[in-house]
Image: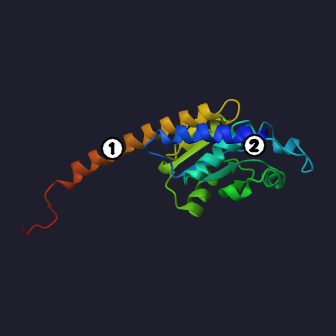
Amino acid sequence: MMEEKTEKVKGEALQIIEAFEVLPKLVVFDLDYTLWPFYCECRSKREMPSLYPHAKGILLALKEKGIDVAIASRSPTADIATAFLNKLDLSSLFVAQEIYSSWTHKTDHFQRIHSRTAVPFNSMLFFDDENRNIQSVSKMGVTSILVGDGVNLGSLREGLIQFSRNWNASQKNKQKWLSKYSNKPDSSNPAV
């Protein structure tokens, strides 16, 4: 039953993704109250965790489309988070797992993810349930989406819309810059 639901969500997520021409190279997820409905530090490693209903289908759809996924979590209990990812058979999906307590509102996490993957910040999409993380990571150039009750198909669509807008705006600015600075005659050579 659960597998059937996951496949259905994956199919819907694929349709959403296919509707966009411009896609992120990497989608980064928070864990607590983004992929699953609890704080790891309030749970025991012995428990069997569960994800939000749409989370696994979305992760599988992104993977199928060749879009990498990563984790940026400020959980103080990385051991429990890692155990839960293993129990849910999700660990192998992620190209980077940055799970550690930090006061930086995840900017360190993103620096490490960037170092590990070489994906530019403006090619990343990020989902988190805490506004302070959204604010600080957005300033790095990452399209960041605040989720209210876990990641779902609606937040995926919203994220891809926002990513496309940000990408198109950055490309327009790049074109303006190139036309402004690359068409001038070279005045560096005084002999000409």
- Of residue 4 and residue 159, the one placed in the foreground of this image is 4
Q: Does residue 4 appear to the left or right of 140 in the view shown?
A: right
What's the residue type where badge 2 is placed? Glu
Give the vertical position of 53 relative to 185 (above or below). above
Residue shown at 48% from the left, 35% from the top: 161
Q: How many marks?
A: 2
Residue 105 in view: no
Dot 2: element: helix
Q: Residues within 10 Å of mark 2 (few under 14, many from 20)?
A: few
In the rendered image, which quarter is residue 172 located in? top left
Q: Residue furthest bottom?
A: 191
**Label 1 sits on residue:** 173
Say which residue label 2 marks. Answer: 3
- In space, the residues marked 1 and 2 are separated at their CA atoms by 44 Å
Query: Splitting the image into 4 quarters, where does residue 40 fall?
Result: top right
Tell me the quadrant of the picture where the N terminus can be found.
top right
Residue 145, above or below 64: above
Q: State the residue at coordinates (67%, 51%).
A: 71
Give the colour scheme of this rendering: rainbow
> Residue reaching furthest left?
192
Residue 46 at x, y percent in the picture: 93, 50
The structure residue drawn at horizontal position 10% and vertical position 67%, both measured from the top left corner, is 190
Q: Position of residue 121 (x, y in %)?
A: 51, 51
Of callouts 1 and 2, which one flags the residue occurring earlier in the amino acid sequence?
2
Q: Residues within 10 Å of mark 1 (few under 14, many from 20)?
A: few
